[in-house]
Amino acid sequence: MASQVNPPRGMRDFLPADKANRERVLGTIRSVYTQHGFDEIETPVMEESSRLHAGLGGDNEKLAFGVLKRALTVDDLQAASTPLDLADLGLRFDLTVPLARFYASHQAELPTVFRAIQIAPVWRAERPQKGRYRQFVQCDIDIIGEKGAIAEIELITATTATLAALGIDGCSIRINDRRLLSSMLAAFGFPAGEHASVLITVDKLDKLGNDGVINELRDRAYPAAPIAALEAFFNRPQTMEFLPFGEAAIRKALPEGVDETAVLELASLATSVDEATRASLVFDPFLVRGMGYYTGTIFEVAHPSLGYSLGGGGRYDGMIGRFLGGDVPAVGFSLGFERIVDLVSPAAVGGLDATALLYEDDVPAALLVSLKSELIASGVRVRLERKPRNIKPLLAQLAESGFARVATVRADSTVSTLEFRELG
């Protein structure tokens, strides 16, 4: 009986046509990011296990793949109290933790304000489903060293420009601030030490709904009074009555007593982004972003046809300080490539002009190579294909692989005498 030859669950192979389309989309993303002043870096696929499990990655830390220490002994296995005791490395579950380590390692070699691109795979032990895989590509841009709102404005501008270049219309960017969330929970009466765990439940609002969040908080035995205050807030008609993003919308959607500085800064950001990009911004008082490292502004990209976000990010001013001993302002925006690529029409990203040269056995190899080289020099992608008796399957395969034209080569052909015909 033949053994299974499928890739590991939650991971995928890509046929040539799919791979070519993915690379074209990645090329567009890289090009726009670069035009906006960002520089690409690369970090290892693994980081130290202790760094990946430092309490900053939220629930994603539970999904990290660990890498066993070398030369483990029976004594090591018996002494381990948790599986993590057996791992000294792990596969990265996002690109932000590696970037923080990278910046701490190379700060002296980098600009005072560093604008980074990272486009690379990450790994999470997810339960595979549509749009969610165990290995997937993230496309991150981050600005480190800039504490002003100009950093958020640059990130939002570059992200909206990237979506436009890919032909993805109708997106909106949901925005909130972790300081507003914390002060909102404080206004309801939740103790400060419980904010992080309460927000983990609130982050499930899209999946559980208002009642589901309230029930889970009750099941977890939080104090009754704050839960009742949150439930009453959920039931206010104006809580989720979105207005054009600005100070009025923020104040209308929030209870009294929230962080005033965060309200004013977020309102100012909304005005600046609208003037600069005309991006579609929406204030969402319950946007949480599950990562524990966010300290200020947070955002997500929503698309009307999807029940999940296309990307997101936020400000994480405290993370790099864990490595350097002092806070460094930092903010990032990540696009989920696997979700993006499914929305992109191949025509939106284009590619090289691709031509197939069909030949029979009587055509000299030297002529074929010469014609191919001359076409390549003119900027054309060329493939040589032996002409079969039944040509229809070959033409269909070429069209699926992105080839737009074919020409038949004869023994006396030159580039100028080739007769091209369009495929499709």
Image (cartoon, rainbow, N blue to C red):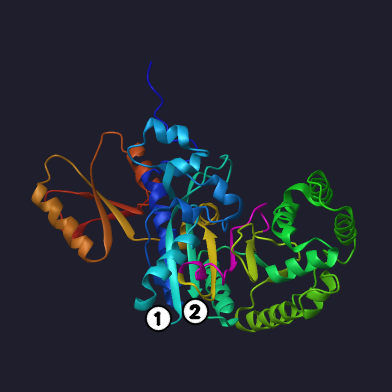
Q: Is residue 315 magenta?
A: yes
Query: Where residue 280 sits in the image (x, y, percent)?
Result: 67, 71
Q: Which residue is mark 2?
A: 145
Residue 85 appears in the figure: yes
- Mark 2, Cα crowd under 10 Å, few <14 / some 14-19 / many 20+, is some
Q: Amino acid at mark 2?
A: Gly
Identify the residue at image location x=43%, y=68%.
117
Left/right placement of residue 424 relative to residue 163 reads left
Q: Quadrant of residue 178?
A: bottom right
The one of 394 and 29 positioned closer to us in this rendering: 29
Q: Report if the CB atoms under discs 1 and 2 are less than 8 Å apart.
A: yes
Vertical order, 157 against 393 (above or below):
below
Question: What residue is at 50 percent from the left and 39 percent from the top?
Answer: 83
- The quarter holding residue 392 reads top left
Where on the picture, by quarter, is residue 354? Answer: bottom left
Residue drawn at 81 percent across, 47 percent down? 221
Residue 177: tell me if it is visible.
no
Horizontal side of residue 245 vs 48, given as left or right? right
Res 58 label? none
Q: Residue at x 27, y 61 (%)?
A: 380
What's the magenta bit mostly, secondary-structure-wise? loop
Residue 177, x across and y down, in percent: 69, 70
Q: In this view, which residue lies farthest toward the top? A: 1
Q: Observer-nearest residue: 345 or 359? A: 345
Quadrant position of the N terminus in the picture: top left
Magenta residue span: 304-323
Which residue is at the front of the view, 8 or 411? 8
Badge 1 marks a residue whose secondary structure is loop
Mark number for residue 111? Answer: 1
Near-viewer residue (191 or 344): 191
**Is-magenta flag for residue 88?**
no
